[in-house]
Image: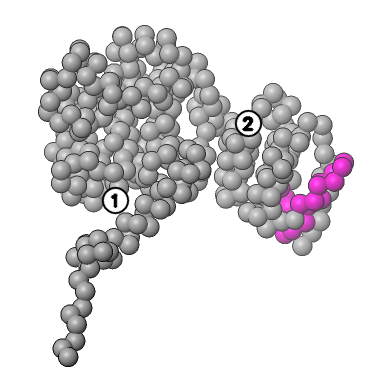
Amino acid sequence: MINKTLEITPNIEPLFGTRDENLRLLEDKLHTRIDLRSDAVHVSGSEESVARVERIFNDYEQLRRTGVTLQNGELNAMLKLVAADPSVTLKGLVDSGRQRTTGGIKRMVQPRSVNQKRYVEAMEQSDMVFGIGPAGTGKTYLAVAMAASALMAKRVSRIILVRPAVEAGERLGFLPGTLQEKIDPYLRPLYDALYDLLDQERVDKMIERNVIEVAPLAFMRGRTLNDAFIIMDEAQNTTSEQMKMFLTRLGNNAKAIITGDVTQIDLPNPRRSGLLEAMEILKGVDGIRFIHFEDGDVVRHHLVQRIIRAYDSFGRQQAELPLGLPEGEREKPSPKPQ
């Protein structure tokens, strides 16, 4: 156990967080005690833990001097990553985020959980990545962000965004409007992510020029997709045949990201989900990465985590009922003969 005093420099208070929540986070995750005084911070703990806290303070000060301003939610998420992995530093996270944020991308592409970090790194290192997990874990948003980064850095020449239009089945032709107007409702989450990352006018021009192509899965058949960053969203709603068709479209200098939530399958027969089958068939295949998200990775409103956990708990309870019957319909024991 050692004690160390860190000098408080001007304008470093944002590092402490709202009501010192960031300091409490470091205390909890790094097993240290941090006492905030008027002119200094006293840190006590193991030599390694104290050194890590000191490194965080030094990194934050260095970033501040170079003009980097981190919002508290963003900073808190980054500190969680730094505390979880001794090899990760605050400065390193910001530097890697800067490298992904080029050519007009409006916000820094930065993971907010350990699994999100693994996901981003997998997309950088592998040509095919499956992101599987519940709603709100950033699967689609981070994939679109990485696609936009690759396009702006000219590592690919186009982005292709794909989604199965399960709700409309084969009846798209009966919907009013042009083909684009018919499929837009199913692809809106992908548009939302693009508009959040790039100027809307720029996105619209790219869509007009087919630099960004947004299309239903059925339009992929027979194509070879070269020099492209391809994202298939809602992959749990593909059939086995559709999934195989999509996975075999990959061409030269192409990257495919497949995202889905196996708890939200809308197919008539959920057991025929192409995503479930691909998870079984492709595990262990060299060059393909599977990243699994958990409810702790949810980055939406804090209630979303609680909702997901409540549904998971309910599902487990239902699975334990005999023959899958609702609790009120359990078979009751026959009365004993008098």
The Cα atoms of the two marked residues, 1 and 2, are separated by 39 Å
Q: Nearer the viewer, residue 282 or 260?
A: 260
- The residue positioned 78% from the left and 31% from the top of the image is 11
Q: Position of residue 331 (x, y in %)?
A: 20, 71
Q: Quadrant of the N terminus?
A: bottom right
Q: Position of residue 163 (x, y in %)?
A: 26, 29
Confirm whether residue 315 shows in the render. yes
Residue 284 image label: 1
Question: The disc labelled 2 sits on which kind of residue?
Answer: Gln
On screen, residue 271 versus residue 318, left or right, reads left
Label 2 sits on residue: 71
Q: Mark 1: few, some, or many residues within 10 Å (few <14, many ≥20)?
A: few
Q: Quadrant of residue 81?
A: top right
Residue 266 image label: none
Q: What is the span of residues highlighted in magenta in the rendered image? A: 34-53
**334 lies above or below 50:** below
Confirm whether residue 228 shows in the render. no
Question: The disc labelled 1 sits on which kind of residue?
Answer: Gly
- The residue positioned 29% from the left and 36% from the top of the image is 234
**34 lies above or below 103:** below
Q: Nearer the viewer, residue 185 or 295?
A: 185
